[in-house]
């Protein structure tokens, strides 16, 4: 069971499982992040939605690998301890795009957002003693010079339902219900 949750003071929203807690209720979270954790288990999955400065020197087709490696570096993971599954999950998020409709049913661009892309990557990272499955989507919002990174980290020992696209049902629902309500957040 999931419920609609407001992110960044209501500027964004998506459906997140109802058993997941807002981590900012128990510890400090940076202003550019929203973090939720699965509370049904002690070592549950973690969702992070992060607003980043747009990396204009990174091409859209290179973005999944770039951001996945950048996350690994931030987690202290060496290149030897990560794998990324190859896929062709880089697509325009214009309303008429068929792939966009599969993943971002509720997402709509403001009229200024004509050149935006979604880049999806799935892989594994060995963080300390834990092996994590990482599902990542980067929304490249070039007209507001923002890369919006949505990351779901799932411990390898946790069972999750994965579709033919390699994404968990939790991540697919999150993307399908994700929307930006207030584009002023990026100004």
Image: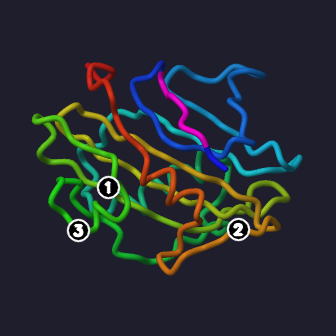
Q: Nearer the viewer, mark 1 or mark 3?
A: 3
The image shows residue 171 at horizontal and vertical percentages of 54, 57
Q: How far apart are marks 3 and 2 (CA)?
A: 26 Å
Q: Could you say which disc has been placed on residue 67 in the image?
A: none
Decide if residue 125 is on the left or right side of residue 94: right
Residue under circle 1?
118
Q: Is the magenta stretch mostly helix, strand or loop?
A: strand
Q: Could you say which disc has been placed on residue 98 in the image?
A: 3
The image shows residue 38 at horizontal and vertical percentages of 75, 45
Kind of element beneath mark 3? helix
User: Is residue 5 part of the magenta span, yes or no?
Assistant: yes
First in sequence, mark 1 or 3: give its number.
Answer: 3
Residue range of the region highlighted in magenta in the rendering: 3-8
- Which class describes the residues within 10 Å of circle 1: few (<14), some (14-19), or many (20+)? many
148 relative to 83, above or below: above
Quadrant housing residue 178: top left
Q: Which of marks 1 and 2 is in front?
A: 2
Kind of element beneath mark 2? loop
The number of numbered discs placed on residues in the rendered structure image is: 3
Q: What residue lies at 65% left-to-right and 54% top-to-bottom?
A: 153
First in sequence, mark 3 or 2: give its number.
Answer: 3
Q: What residue lies at 40% left-to-right and 76% top-to-bottom?
A: 87
32 relative to 127, above or below: above
The image shows residue 121 at horizontal and vertical percentages of 46, 64
Q: How far apart are marks 1 and 3 (CA)?
A: 13 Å
Residue under circle 2?
160
Quadrant housing residue 35: top right
Q: What residue lies at 25% left-to-right and 41% top-to-bottom?
A: 141
Kind of element beneath mark 1? strand
Q: Quadrant of the C terminus?
A: top left
């Amino acid at each position: 069971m999931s419920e609609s949750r407001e992110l960044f003071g209501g500027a964004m929203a998506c459906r997140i499982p109802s058993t997941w807690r807002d981590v900012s209720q128990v510890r400090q979270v940076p202003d550019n992040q929203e973090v939720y954790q699965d509370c049904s288990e002690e070592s549950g999955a973690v969702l992070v939605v992060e607003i980043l400065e747009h990396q204009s020197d990174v091409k859209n087709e290179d973005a999944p690998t770039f951001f996945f490696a950048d996350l690994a570096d931030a987690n202290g993971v060496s290149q030897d301890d990560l794998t990324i599954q190859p896929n062709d999950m880089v697509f325009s998020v214009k309303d008429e795009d068929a792939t966009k409709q599969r993943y971002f049913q509720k997402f709509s661009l403001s009229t200024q957002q004509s050149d935006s892309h979604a880049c999806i990557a799935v892989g594994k990272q060995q963080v300390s003693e834990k092996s994590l499955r990482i599902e990542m989507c980067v929304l490249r919002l070039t007209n507001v010079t923002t890369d919006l990174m949505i990351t779901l980290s799932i411990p390898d020992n946790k069972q999750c339902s994965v579709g033919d696209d390699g994404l968990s049902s939790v991540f697919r629902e999150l993307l399908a219900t994700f929307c930006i309500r207030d584009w002023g957040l990026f100004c």
